[in-house]
Image: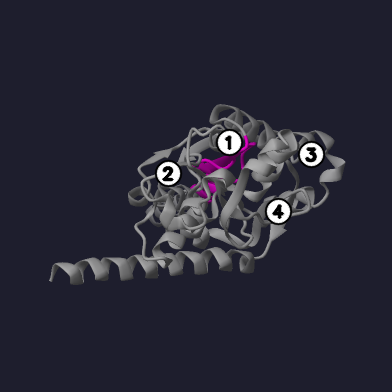
């Protein structure tokens, strides 16, 4: 009898253990819930002021997720390590980031689910540094101790400008210019340049074209000094840990946005017409740019070190 009782107890313990394992698995299922957790790294859009941009971003992606019956919660992130940590804890399902930050968390993203936005008919935008035509500035060296305007968070633009300066053996942006104004929007940067409030503006070709449409006089008064190759400006990625069923629903919905006119309308606030899937190859230009930038920085540091020896 004691042996049977002991066997029954062991069997009950075993069943309890199996039930606990299944319960834990169910609780840890990142999509056994009605809410999608979206992360936003730095500032993504510069066409409007930051508060307006944040509201528009949340409205757009709330509507986007509503199409697949998910609510949304948003969290700001500055540290890529924290993004990866939260993804691995199943607390973060997708991320919106500029490509420089995105490369730091790319290993945690499903390589088959990278997205970006289509602006007009263009996936990529050029970074351009604008000056006034009347100032007769035709080289970066002439901007030494001048003023510069660009929106806070425009990391890709600043990296391009830093690289362009380093390639000319000039100091980086923060040392080359006497003052940097981190204004609210790309249009503000162009307007400040037009009205002689700054000597240069770091923007995108899309923003410059829009400014010229709104004010044709800008076309004759402001000109590009340097221009980058076309580059992706924003990347959206899905945590590789989330179930494939969720990723497939997002993918299917993104490829059929014509069926969701309200989502398209909200995207138009960013002058965008589409969310499109991109390949990992599209990020190679940014990756190569970052590597080149780091190489130029190392050369500059070595030059400084050698000067002190």
Q: Which residue, given by chain and number where applicable, does mark 4 sit on?
A: 245
The reply to whether discs 1 and 4 touch (Cβ–Cβ < 8 Å) is no
User: Upstream in the sequence, badge 4 or badge 2?
Assistant: 2
Rounded to the nearest whole Å, what is the CA distance between mark 3 and mark 2?
28 Å
Asked where in the image residue 265 lies, by quadrant, the reply is: top right
Residue pictured at 50% horizontal, 37% vertical: 75
User: Upstream in the sequence, badge 1 or badge 4?
Assistant: 1
User: Upstream in the sequence, badge 4 or badge 3?
Assistant: 4
Q: Which residue, given by chain and number where applicable, does mark 2 sit on?
A: 78
The reply to whether discs 4 and 2 touch (Cβ–Cβ < 8 Å) is no
In this orientation, which residue lies closer to the viewer: 75 or 157? 157
Q: Which residue, given by chain and number where applicable, does mark 3 sit on?
A: 264
Q: Is residue 19 left or right of residue 166?
A: right
The reply to whether discs 4 and 3 touch (Cβ–Cβ < 8 Å) is no
Q: Can the viewer see residue 93? A: no
Q: Residue furthest left?
A: 309
Magenta-drawn segment = 19-47
How far from the left and from the top, in percent, is residue 62?
67, 34
Q: Is residue 196 above or below residue 133?
A: above
The reply to whether discs 1 and 2 touch (Cβ–Cβ < 8 Å) is no
Q: Which residue, given by chain and number where applicable, does mark 1 sit on?
A: 194
Rounded to the nearest whole Å, what is the CA distance between mark 4 and mark 2?
29 Å
Residue pictured at 38% horizontal, 70% vertical: 295
The reply to whether discs 3 and 1 touch (Cβ–Cβ < 8 Å) is no
Residue 163 among magenta residues:
no
Foreground: disc 4 or disc 3: 3
Q: Is residue 209 left or right of residue 195?
A: right
């Amino acid at each position: 009898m004691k042996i049977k009782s002991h066997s029954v107890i062991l069997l009950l313990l075993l069943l309890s253990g199996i039930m606990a394992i299944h319960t834990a698995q169910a609780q840890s299922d990142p999509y056994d819930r009605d809410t999608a957790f979206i992360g936003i790294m730095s500032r993504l859009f510069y066409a409007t002021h930051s508060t307006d941009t944040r509201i528009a971003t949340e409205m757009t992606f709330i509507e986007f997720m509503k199409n697949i019956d998910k609510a949304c919660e948003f969290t700001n992130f500055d540290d890529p390590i924290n993004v990866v940590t939260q993804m691995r804890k199943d607390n973060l399902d997708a991320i919106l980031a500029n490509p420089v930050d995105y490369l730091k968390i790319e290993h945690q993203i499903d390589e088959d689910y990278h997205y970006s936005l289509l602006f007009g008919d263009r996936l990529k935008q050029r970074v351009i540094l604008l000056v006034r035509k009347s100032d007769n500035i035709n080289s970066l060296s002439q901007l030494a101790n001048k003023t510069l305007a660009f929106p806070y968070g425009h990391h890709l633009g600043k990296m391009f400008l830093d690289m362009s300066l380093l390639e000319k053996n000039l100091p980086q942006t923060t040392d080359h210019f006497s003052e940097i104004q981190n204004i609210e929007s790309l249009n503000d940067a162009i307007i400040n340049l037009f009205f002689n409030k700054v000597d240069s503006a770091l923007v995108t070709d899309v923003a410059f074209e829009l400014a010229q449409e709104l004010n044709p006089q800008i076309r004759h008064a402001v000109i590009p000094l340097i221009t980058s190759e076309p580059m992706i400006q924003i990347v959206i990625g899905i945590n590789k840990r989330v179930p494939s069923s969720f990723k497939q629903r997002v993918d299917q919905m993104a490829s059929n946005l014509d069926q969701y006119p309200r989502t398209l309308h909200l995207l138009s606030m960013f002058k965008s017409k589409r969310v499109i899937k991109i390949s990992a190859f599209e990020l190679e230009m940014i990756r190569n740019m970052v590597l080149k930038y780091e190489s130029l920085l190392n050369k500059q540091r070595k030059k400084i070190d050698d000067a002190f020896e």
